[in-house]
Image (tube, rainbow, N blue to C red):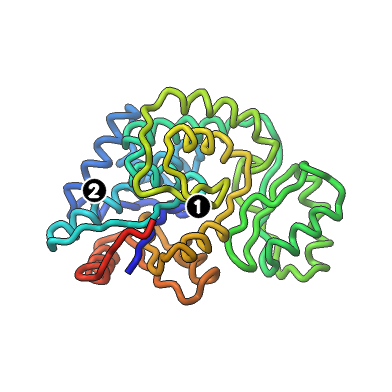
Amino acid sequence: MTVALLFSPQGSQSVGMGRELAAISPAASAVFRQADEALGWSVSSLAWDGPEEELNHTRQTQPCLVTTSIACLRALEEELDGMGETLAPAFVAGHSVGEYAALVAAGALSVADAVRLVARRGELMANARVSGGMVAVIGLDRDAVAVVVSSLGLGSDLVVANDNAPGQVVISSMPDALAAAATPLRAAGARRSIPLNVSGPFHSPHMVAIGAELARALATAEWHDAEPPVVSNVTAGPVRDAAEIRDLLGRQVYSPVEWARSVRRMVADGVDTFVECGPGNALAGMVRRIVPSARTLNVSDPASLAAAADALAGAAVRVSA
């Protein structure tokens, strides 16, 4: 068995996330305490008790989600350690903000630095002085969506922002450009176009100024080389070097999330089992659409923790990278 760890994207959050794990896992509980101390406000209270409206504000969502995802990982490591097992993933990867949790898993960032950075990232994104949004296109693959986008002649004003899985692609732009794309996408075979509940045209060139601000925040953190390597959203390739990781994170906010390519790269390098750490199982679902033969597990609550630990225990969990 060759394992990759995955970390959940924004949109996976829900009130109560992480609470049951923290109640049974000292390691998970410690992560929430570290986040509370680093930020000076109660991540744990907001993640566990809400209110939902406040949790869904980007500036709060991102640190709460990353904290919960790291707590899920620490609970899994603790559970396996109690069984005399050690988890040795070949790769780690996270979707968009989830990449910060992946970097904690790889030892490239501390919990405190990660939550401080995503709090700043969320603040910058929430306050972006750029109108616009994102639309999920269902039923078309990336190439088909790209053809439609190109045919509109808008250049970098309208781009593919997330290549999540076959039949699930996200575009990003200003409202007029997104509206202009709706009819030709439908004519090309899209089943649905779903506006996302986001505050701006993320993962597009409209966010370059945000990337520059974020780069200044990234420079304040203490960085280490990643081991195992993190598969970058920007390049869909494995990265270990701390300086390169920092550069790619600055670019990530205005670059497409190459999720489908990332998963295919990990499978090509030997991964056969993906473990999603964090609320929900959005990434596990994407993986199954990208590589139907892949095994997927998730860790989000005590029941899924026990199931994942049982599935991993006793297996030849090995590093191929």
Quadrant in which the C terminus appears: bottom left
Q: Which residue is mark 1?
A: 11
- Residue 164 placement: quadrant: bottom right
Q: In terms of secondary structure, where does tag 2 sit?
A: helix
At 48% from the left and 44% from the top, the residue drawn is: 97
Mark 2 and mark 1 residues within 8 Å of each other at the beta carbon: no
Quadrant in which the N terminus appears: bottom left
Q: Amino acid at mark 1?
A: Gly
Q: Is residue 304 left or right of residue 139?
A: left
At 79% from the left and 52% from the top, the residue drawn is: 179
Disc number at residue 28? 2
Considering depth in this image, is 19 or 298 the residue closer to the camera?
298
At 38% from the left and 35% from the top, the residue drawn is: 115
Give residue 5's position: percent from left, percent from top: 37, 57
Give residue 309's position: percent from left, percent from top: 24, 65
- Residue 209 placement: quadrant: top right
Q: Is residue 224 left or right of residue 257?
A: left
Q: In terms of secondary structure, where does tag 1 sit?
A: loop
